[in-house]
Amino acid sequence: MTPCPTPLTSQFDLSLAHQGMFSVADAAGLLMTCRDGSLWITLDNDTRDIVLSAGERFLTTQHRRAIIYAMGPSSLSLELAPAAQAARRTGKAGGGRGARMMLALQPA
């Protein structure tokens, strides 16, 4: 019998206080959903300002650091998009087997 690989953790939920920040080192394939409040998202070397209100989502395919800033008390979900999950399972995303979403909490 072949052992079943451990499933990848593909979703992370968190709440941020007003002016709280969260940094994601590589946001490629990451679906960011604002569940409550309002978020400002900026990507390294990207001139856009992405602002999400409750219920809105943002997905990037570019390998860039994302900084998520809470414009008020907010909650959000970070989830690997289905294509990114499949690529990580097959090793095509550069991480190979056992690749995980790596997140880093930054002080406000």
Image (cartoon, rainbow, N blue to C red):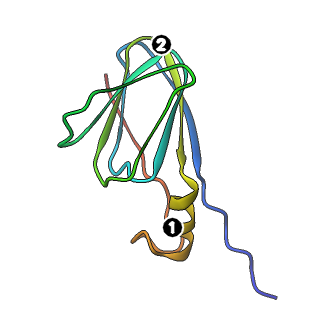
| Residues marked 1 and 2 touching at CB (< 8 Å) | no
Q: Secondary structure at mark 1?
A: helix
- Assign the C terminus to one quadrant of the image: top left
Q: Left or right of 79: which side holds 47?
A: left
Q: Which residue is mark 1?
A: 88
Q: Left or right of 101: which side holds 1?
A: right
Rendered location of residue 99, percent (x, y): 49, 65
Please tell me which residue is depicted at 59% across the width and 52% down the height of the picture. 10
Nearest to the eye among marks 1 and 2: give it: 1
Residue type, mark 1 in image? Arg
Q: Which residue is mark 2?
A: 73
Residue 72 sits above or below residue 12 on the image: above
Q: Secondary structure at mark 2?
A: loop
Rendered location of residue 51, percent (x, y): 37, 23
Residue 60 sits above or below residue 21 on the image: below
Please tell me which residue is depicted at 42% across the width and 45% down the height of the picture. 103
Q: Between residues 17 and 61, which one lies in front from this camera angle?
A: 61
